[in-house]
Image: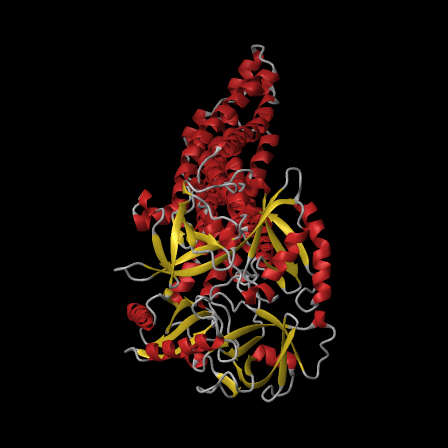
Amino acid sequence: MIALVTLALGIGVNTSMFSLVSVLLLQAAPYPDGQRLCQILAETRQGKRFDYSAVETREIGSAASAFSSLTTLRYMDTAMVEPGKPAEQVLAVMGSASFFSTFGVQPMLGRAFTAEETQPGRNQVVVLSHSFWERRFGGSPAIIGRSLRLDGESVTVIGVMPPGFEWRILWGRTALWRPLNFTPDQLKNRPYRTFQLIGRLKPGATPVQAAAELGPVAAAQLKESPADYDGLTYRPMILNEAQMDDEGRHIIWMLLGLAGFVLLIACANLANLQLARATVGMRVFAIRAALGASRAQLIRQQLTESVLLSLGGGALGIVMALWLNHVLSAMITIADEPGSLNLGLDGRILLFTFVLASLTGVIFGLVPAWLSSRTDVVTSLKSQSRGSTSGRGQHRMRQALIVAEVTLALVLLGGAGVMQRGFDKFLHKDLGWDTEHVLTGSLPLPESRFPTPESRLEFFRKMEARLAALPGVDKVALTTAVPIWGYGTTRKVFTDKQAAADQSNLPLANHVMITSDYFKVIGVPLVEGREFPADIKATDPKVVIVNESLARQLWPGRSAVGQRIASIDGNQTDWSEVIGVVRDTESAADIGIEKVRGVVFRSVAHEPWSWIRLAIRAHSPASLIESVRRAVSEVDADLPATDLMTVGSAVERNQHNLVVVAHILDGFALLGLVLAAVGLYGVISNLVAQRTAEFGIRMALGASPSNVLGLVLRHGLTLTAIGLALGLGGAYGLSRLLNSIMPRLVGPDALALAVMTVLLFAVAVVACWLPARRATKVDPVIALRAD
């Protein structure tokens, strides 16, 4: 029973982790010939990005002959208003004419939009997602032809997509799809990057071939704008692979690797159990050999038993994997929606489980069977069954297995301990700003309703004044970013004393647009200079505020106030005067940012974007959510505020899956600890059983119980010490690997490794002491009589 449970745990955990890897990394997008769908990634010295301007999409599309179709799309938050109902912010995707043909899926009701409807002023049609259609409209077929109000204009529902089209990993909470119309500004503005490119490869074409075709495009763009395209290469990625960032991909593979450690510990445990069985049954093997059984027959018998045992454990492991998959599906969130990940067992996973179970049976059955078959028949027949001891080969094998178990267990415990300590440090460190008293939310402005900078600035002033008048509100600011997920937009910068000719070596800085009370709202102190005046105008000279990191980088040993700084946006160079320096802040939730980057803060009066975030300071920010929502509606009923939450809630939501990973690691560590303890206990217990007569003789000759206790403990703890020494090196190596994958979360942590080493040693002491104590209670008379 112990063997079955041990094997079920190892196989169940690995099968579940393989299910996770399969769903998130290996399965093609769930569309016809999904393995031919690619998303185009651009890599420059500034980093990776999937967003392009309309100018760039045309240039890429003209050279991408490896694709049978290429579609441009854009994610947008859209305000939907129905009579008698509050405005609702929904996620929409704007797609080019080839959108549905690229994915190879057509609406289940109605029709897709046409190429004509992607022309300027003709895109007043929408196709609904199946879940949104059911949730908002009760799944009524009468929805086709019905008018909706989106961003202040009337649109007509022309179709409903089938449920299979809603791949959450790609679309998230998308409620509808709409024809993409480029505005005149988008058509000519190269730095306006907000569109993505997904294409379907021609039969026989490969991503490598498509990347080679885009090489000349990258070279031409680099020549056109060296600052924007420094080091540019295009890399089409298979669509499912493109949906996972590097950190997430590394974490998932890490989980599968650590699950493999659990299986190895289980295998070592089972091998020890098999060796113990072989030792106890050695006389039986000798009798069978004496009666004419060949070595091959003896090995085949034990191997058959082992494989049957492993297949039984594999069956139980599938049951356990189904349960674990159910738990993980409920815990892991996709697009902030729990239960949106469906972890099932497809044919590949069942085959993986079968192969894993069979190999496990062969691995932990073959070696013990081979060692047992080598037993000398005459010696075994002469020995008594109770007093028989294992041969030197079996003894060394069992010792090696115990050392391996302890080593692997410490690697698991060390990895879990380092991760947990890293998570705790990350979530509770000083970020340089006040995360306790800030309420935030997003408010995208439709360009169709706010087409000019003047119209957006007027709306910002009204909104700021209305929110500031709410009871309980201390300060209000509008901004393009709050340092929760990082600042986002980056541009190259330089000073008036630096040459801009070599644009490849210019530093990067985040650019954030803010209103005058921004720093007071988020609690960032001014180091020197002054903040933006409340009455700053678009016609005033351009001024900026920088953070300490950028000030030290550009003006080391000097004051930054009064200096001039230029930022490069496409082919445009924008000069401004520095009027202030603020303290550095760190992202509260983004694990991918390794260090504080330079930040340039600009007034929204000079760059009034069409995307804005609310930042509201209050003693009890959570209590203001409903009143803020109503106030926004009063200013403009067609613009609902979305994602209204405290900073703490935003971090908790963003880090939810990371917490799930931490729980999984805890489970792995606990399993490793228990399996190692059981294995060590089993070996020492078997040793005591085999050496009962020896202990009786020792005690009959005058040895005290403490001598016997020390003898048994020394044997077990020596093996433990060797395993701990090896495991400590492995755990340190794992911590360095995790640090290279997630530098903000994990670093070398001697304290965590020391604590886990002591914990495992303490458990080993208990596992050895229990059977050792039993050895001290051997009655010499009974032991000698039995021998």
718 or 737, which lies in front? 737
The image shows residue 476, relative to residue 258, as above or below, that is below
* Position in image of residue 123 (x %, y %): 46, 56
The image shows residue 643, relative to residue 62, as above or below, that is below
Is residue 577 visible in this depiction of the protein? yes
What kind of colouring is applied to the model shown?
secondary structure
As drawn, is 570 to the left or to the right of 133? Answer: right
* Position in image of residue 100 (x %, y %): 51, 45
As drawn, is 676 to the left or to the right of 620? Answer: right
Instruction: Write down the quadrant of residue 289 in the picture.
Output: top right
* Position in image of residue 409 (x %, y %): 52, 46
The image shows residue 82, relative to residue 375, as above or below, that is below
Going 53% across and 67% down the picture, which residue do you hit?
A: 488
197 or 586, which lies in front? 197
Instruction: Write down the quadrant of residue 321 in the picture.
Output: top left
Instruction: Write down the quadrant of residue 633 in the picture.
Output: bottom left
515 or 632, which lies in front? 632
* Position in image of residue 453 (x %, y %): 49, 75
Count of marks overlaid on the render: 0
Quadrant where the N terminus sits is: top left
236 or 720, which lies in front? 236
